Structure formats: structure tokens, C-alpha cells
Image (cartoon, grey):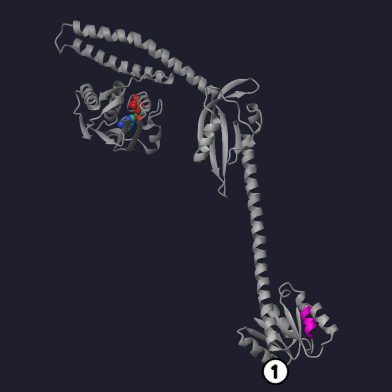
Amino acid sequence: MILIVDDQVENIYSLQKLLESKDFLVDTALSGEEALKKVLKNDYALIIMDVQMPGMDGFEVAETLSGFNKTKEIPVIFLSAVNKDKKFITRGYASGGIDYVTKPVDPDILMLKVKTFYRLYEQTLALNETQRALRSEIEERKRAQQELKDQVDQLHSTLESLPQLAFTADAQGQIEFVNNKWLGYAASATSFPETHPEDPEILSLWLDARMREVPLELEVRIKERQAELFRFHLLRIAPIKEKNNNIKWVGTFTDIDDQKQIEKKKDEFLSIASHELKTPLTSIKAYAQLLSRTIDAPEQDPSRKYINKVQHQVSKLNSLITDLLDISKIENGKLKITKKSFDFENLLSSAIDTIYHTHENSQLDIQRQGDRIEETVVGDEIRIEQVLINYLTNAIKYAPNSNQVVVKTERSEGQIRVSVTDFGIGIPEHKLGNIFGKFYRVEESSLRFQGLGIGLYICSEIIKQHNGTVGTTSQLGQGSTFYFTLPLN
Ligand code: ADP
């Protein structure tokens, strides 16, 4: 809006008509005082003001306006009929006006000036707005930066208080911070500790994890600098997304050497104990067989019943010891897999027969579903049968109120998938992830059912050595499905 200030109504009238004919919004004031009041209340893009007015003259009004923040940017064009001499014109400019027009006014020239000043005022406003926005953005950035710095400081002091070696690194893997424990193992704050020559290379594995933006977890021996001894550590490096979407990496080395030594001793004990137990047990088994053959008594005779029970218990003990021996073989990398081509259908029938045979007294019903496997499979037939028997035994053992089991085979791109489904107690969902772990048993059922928690672990190791996969799905109280896959070539 444009404000016209003049004490002569007729002057105002003609100028107002002229401006309104060019689509400008116009307001008017009949004195300097009225003009000041209006300017403080409303927003004007331009003031056209007569110099000679009773009371406050135009110069005084302009000087007052230049003293207020709100009004100092408004351009003022002075109109004057009397004071054409240089002194007045100079005062006009000095008081804050940006143009001085003498009467009689040439309407075309005045309109040109008005348009120019109007545009200029709009540009000034836009510029001011941009400046304000910029200033607030700078403030915002400063605040965010400070916040980030506070967070980083907090992270560093947390890392400093950890009992582990800890570091942070940027997206390119450049170490940015290490805690004071770091230098007990690494030569500098920018390099990694020396790893054992037989252990995997940290940097190349981490590079791979960085490319895929996934965490890295690794057991590795690193050298303690003072004692010059390698100690087992669990290395964990995890990506952290910052607010600006940059990735930072935070890593820790946790000393697990004592644990590892204890585990090693336990494995050695298991290995020795199971070997030592196996020899007398084989003799007991042989003598029990001899006894069974030499006893000259009818089927119902108690002595025959007892010898059958002995043989049954001996065979249970034998399979427990065999499992323990398998565990120690896995630990020592000595679980032998002898791969040959074999007929998978034969293996299935044989495993199912064995299960029927060992559960003669129950109403067991094993249903076979799915594709027939015509292709020959390459693998260790005995070990794969062991896996299937283990799945089937568990399916019966953990389903005390059901005698139905489904064995399903499916063929898909380059692999076969064998699943065993039962309708038993099921497994809580949050425990499914651990089920193939060594010595893992589901707590809720461990008292009701006997076992060591190693069968599934051995199964997963056997299938792993055949480049296959194992897995399970289950619903508590409804039943479980355990499956394994094997590649076909
Ligand atoms: P074990 O049966 O000797 O305990 P496994 O390694 O064969 O050892 O099984 C590990 C655990 O998984 C079992 O203790 C049991 O809690 C759970 N489990 C295995 N199979 C089933 C199944 N079919 N249904 C429910 N739970 C099962």
C-alpha cells in the first residue's frame, strides 16, 4: 500500500486517482502527525509526502520514521512546490527521503519513480526475509552441531568407562576415537591390534561389512603388547546412523580368553570321557548279546525280559555316548563326512523303518507327503539318516499326546527340502533362534523330557558340512516343523 501525506485534500485526490488507476492500493493522511500514527499501525511500501505542512513538516516526519526499525526501510518521495533550491533538496535526502520531486508533477515521471521504488521496497523486504531465514538456519545448524558434539562426548565417555577395548570410526573405516584400553593392544590410536596369523583378517571382513552396512561379529586372538601374548576377544562392530544419515561405526573387543580356555578344557574332558566310556560299554553290549543268545528260557521268562531291558538301556547309553563323541569330533574338526551318491528314497524308508522298529509298542503313524526324490543325492548317507532319525525321534518325544508325524519332501531349484512335522508341545517363538545351539534345551520342557540338548546341534553341523541349511517353525501347543535342505549337485 502507498501512503499519500498532504494537507491539501485536492492534491491528495488527484494523486490518489492517478495511483489507483495503475492498480496501487492507496491510503492517505492529512498531516505529519496522522501519517506517523498510520505508519506505526499499518505496513506501507512507499510514502509520497508533501514537504510543507502545518505542524510537523515532511522532513520531520521522514527523520522520525528513520528512527524506527519498523519504518526505516520505507522509501519516501518528497513533493514540494516551494523549496526548489538545493539546500531544501539536500535536507530532503538527508532526512531519509530517497527522492525529491518538485511541483508541478509530471504524472508519467512520478509513476515511473513510484513503480521503481515500490519494486525496490518489495525486493528489500524479500531480501530481509531471506536474511532472517538464513540467520535462523545458521542458528539451527549451530544448535544441531552442539547437540551432535554433546552426543559424541557422551558416547566417548561411555566408551572410556567400558572394561572392553572400544573405538569409533567414520564411514570409510578411519578410526576417530579409541578408549585408553586400546593402547594396551594396538601400537597407535589409528591402527588395529595385531591379530593371530591363523585368525581371520579383521580389516577385510570389516570392509565387506561396511559395503553391506551390516554389523560384524568375530572371535579373534589379538596380541597384548606388554605380555606379548595373544588373547581371545569377541570383536563386535556395529553401524550407527546419525541424524544426517551419515554412518558411524562403533566397535568393541571383549576379552573372552578365560571362557575359551574353560571351554577347551570342557571339550577335552568330553572327548576323553566319551572315549573311555565307549570301550567298557562295547564289552557290556557284546556280553549282553551273548547272554541273550545263550539263555535257554522261553519268551515270557523274567530272565529274558530283564536281558531285553539291559540291551535296551545299553543301546540308549550307546547313543548318548556316540552323540558326545560326535560333539568332540565337531569341536576338533574331525567329524568325518564321506560323500557318495545314494538313493534318497531308500534312506527315507530306512529311517522311517528304524523309527517304527524302535517304537513297536506305540500306535505311531508316520505319513509320507510331497515329491518323490528321483535324483541321486551326493552326501554321507549314514549321517543324513542320523539327522532324519533325530528329527523323527524328537517329533515323537516332544508330542506325548499325538502319534502322528508327517515327513514331507519337496524339490525346488537345485535342492531338496525334507521336513518333519509333529503335533506336540511346540516351542516358544523367542526360543526358536537358539534351538540348534550346543547343549540348548527349552527350559519349560526340560524337566518333563530327558535329553542333553546336543542332537539338533549335531544335525545342524552335519547339514552345514553338506552345504545345506536347517530350520524350524513352531507354534506353542500346536506342534513344530523341523526341516533341512540339501543341494542337489
Ligand atoms: P534333546 O532332545 O536331547 O534335549 P535336541 O538337541 O534334540 O536335544 O533338542 C534341543 C531342544 O529342542 C530340546 O531340549 C527341546 O526343548 C527342543 N525340541 C527339539 N525338537 C522338538 C520338537 N519336535 N518339539 C518341541 N521341542 C523340541
Quarter holding residue 414: top left
Relative depth, front residue between 444 and 282:
282
Secondary structure, mark 1, is: helix
Q: Position of residue 368 (x, y in %)?
A: 21, 32
Residue 181 higher or lower than 321, as above or below = below
Count of numbered circles in the view: 1
Give the residue type at disc 1: Glu
Residue 445 visible (yes or no): no
Q: Is residue 248 left or right of residue 322?
A: right
Residue found at x 65% / y 46% = 149
Left or right: where 142 falls relative to 242? right
Location of residue 102 with respect to 249 vertically, above or below: below
Q: Quadrant of the C terminus?
A: top left
Q: Left or right: 16 with respect to 429?
A: right
Residue at horizontal 67%, vertical 78%? Answer: 118
Q: Position of residue 229 (x, y in %)?
A: 60, 20
Between 5 and 390, the one nearer to me in the picture: 5
Residue sitting farthest toward the right: 87
Q: Is residue 45 left or right of residue 475?
A: right
> Magenta span has 62?
yes
Q: Quadrant of the N terminus?
A: bottom right
Quarter residue 441 falls in = top left
Indicate the position of residue 146 as horizontal and vertical percent values.
66, 50
Residue segment shown in magenta: 56-63
Q: Which residue is mark 1?
A: 10
- Residue 10 is drawn in which quadrant? bottom right
**Residue 411 position within the rendered picture, expressed as x and y whole percent measured from the top left:** 27, 35
Residue plotted at (70% across, 85% down): 109
